Image (spheres, helix red, strand yellow):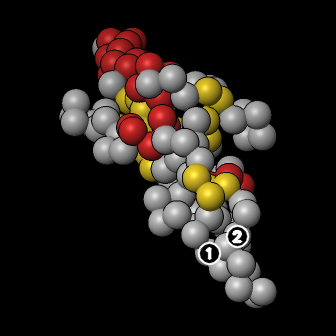
Amino acid sequence: MKQVRLLLFFLTFTFSSIAVAQSVYTTQTGEKYHKTNCRYLKYSKKEIDLKKAIALGYAACKVCKPTASNTKPSALKSSNTTPTNTASKNTTATQCTGKTKAGNRCKRKTKNSSGRCYQH
């Protein structure tokens, strides 16, 4: 009887781990996926499944090196977990709309939706 309980416990654990997906994070404009504590997620963080991130063309971050074995598991979500702003990956950089102290237009490029670079 103990062996049957032990077997049932392991089967339950195995099936529950199959139902858990690996969760990684992307930025709003980035092309990489990250672990939850990566320094590149300071300003923007969007949770997505690892398989979905790979299917959408995201690559692994070379700093935090997220893999299926070292990312945190999260419960599977419904099929409507696609990123809401997939067009941001295809946007091109534009000149910053900010002004310098001298009153001239900033010469930096930005992909930010506000049209301003990181200094403005």
**Which amino acid type is shown beneath numbered disc 1?**
Gly
Residue at image position (44%, 25%) is: 56
Q: In the rendering, at what x and y percent does residue 114 appear?
A: 48, 66
Residue 55 seen anywhere in this rendered image of the structure: yes
- Nearest the eye: 50 or 56: 56
Q: In the rendering, at what x and y percent does residue 73 appear?
A: 47, 36
- Nearest the eye: 15 or 27: 27
- Left or right, 32 with respect to 49, comes to right
What label sits on residue 52 in the rendered view?
Answer: none
| Label 2–label 1 contact, CB within 8 A | yes
**Which amino acid type is shown beneath numbered disc 2?**
Cys
User: Which mark sits nearer the N-terminus, 2 or 1?
Assistant: 1
Task: Count residues near mark 1 (Cα–Cα under 10 Å), then give few for <14, some for 14-19, many for 20+.
Answer: some
Task: Count residues near mark 2 (Cα–Cα under 10 Å), then give few for <14, some for 14-19, many for 20+.
Answer: some
What label sits on residue 98 in the rendered view?
Answer: 1
Q: Quadrant of the C terminus?
A: bottom right
What label sits on residue 106 in the rendered view?
Answer: 2
Q: Secondary structure at mark 2?
A: loop
Q: In the rendering, at what x and y percent does residue 20 appear?
A: 38, 29
